[in-house]
Structure formats: C-alpha cells, structure tokens
Image (spheres, helix red, strand yellow):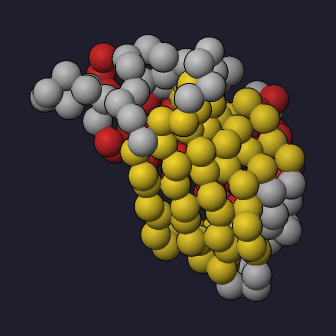
Amino acid sequence: MSFATSPADLPGRDAILSRTGLAFIEDMIAGRLPQPPIGRTLGFAPVEAARGRVVFEGAAGFDAMNPMGGVHGGWYGAILDSCMGCAVMTELERGELYTTLEFKVNIARALPLDLAVRATGLVQHKGRTTAVAMGELRGIADGRVYATGSTTCLVMRPE
C-alpha cells in the first residue's frame, strides 16, 4: 500500500474527474493511485469498495491518544468520515466530485489502543446535489460497536 508523501503525489483533478468514483476508490485500494497521507498518519486505509459501500480498517495507536490516555474523539471521526465519504464517492459518475457538508459521530464505548477495527460506510441516498451516508465502527476480533456516524455530502460537477 502506497501513501502520498507530498502534495505532488496526490492524484490530480484530471485523475479524479476522468474516473467514476468507484473506479477511483478501487484504484487506491489496488495501489494504482496513492492513498491519502491522513491514512498513514492516523493508521487506517480502505480495504473494500462496492457501489454505495466502502470499508476501512485500522487501529488507533499511541499518537491518537488524548491527554487522559484514551483514543481522541477525532480519530473516531476521521475514520468514519473517511468510510462514509468514500462510500458516497463510489456513487459518483465521471466528472463529479463531493465534499462533506456535515458529519456526526456517536461514540458508544472507549476504543482500546491498537485494537483492529473495521469502519463501514453505506450510502442511504445519492441525489443530484446531495448524498447521505451512515457509518459503523466495529472491532474486528470482538465484533463490538465502538461508534456510529452519519454524513451529508455536497455533490459537485465542476465546469
């Protein structure tokens, strides 16, 4: 798995707009496009994609801890925003982009450090200008729900 290491490594606008959203995510998973650096920084990456569904896997390490010794809430938000947003991406046609308008995270229980988790994003609705997705963060070994989320995304067609 290769991550972008500088802005020059990130896929350009043409690389994004010339593919369907699903092809773009599949190309990242297959290593034909680099993965975004936030995944390397926070310890997660996409592992599965289908139309309307994306799965990320990872684990919150020491660098994701808050001052009280727990996993920072932003880590839950980042992995859920990623799986939900990428699920929306899989619904996009060539020439479309998206951005997150808002997202919400509900933390159900404390996430132990280094516990392997799976974050699954599922599209609930994709319209002409907005899309809505839900997400769930579960432990891979224990199957427990650690957090859930929802997002609303803006769908754009740059001229």
Q: Is residue 89 left or right of residue 72?
A: right
Q: Residue shown at 65%/70% (left/top)?
A: 132
Which residue is nearer to you in this view: 86 or 15? 86
Q: Is residue 86 left or right of residue 77?
A: right
Q: Residue shown at 80%/57% (left/top)?
A: 52
Residue 10 locus on image (x, y percent): 59, 43
Which residue is nearer to you in this view: 32 or 107? 107
Which residue is nearer to you in this view: 72 or 14? 72
Question: How many marks overall?
Answer: 0
Residue 84 locus on image (x, y percent): 62, 54
* Residue 67 drawn above or below residue 88: above
Is residue 151 visible to the viewer in this orientation of the structure?
yes
Q: Residue shown at 81%/63% (left/top)?
A: 91
* Residue 12 drawn above or below residue 44: below
* Residue 115 drawn above or below residue 45: above
Residue 107 locus on image (x, y percent): 40, 45
Q: Is residue 117 left or right of residue 19?
A: left
Q: Quadrant of the C terminus?
A: bottom right
Residue 57 locus on image (x, y percent): 62, 28
Q: Residue shown at 76%/85% (left/top)?
A: 128
On the image, which quarter does residue 1 sit in? Answer: top right
Is residue 8 visible to the viewer in this orientation of the structure?
no
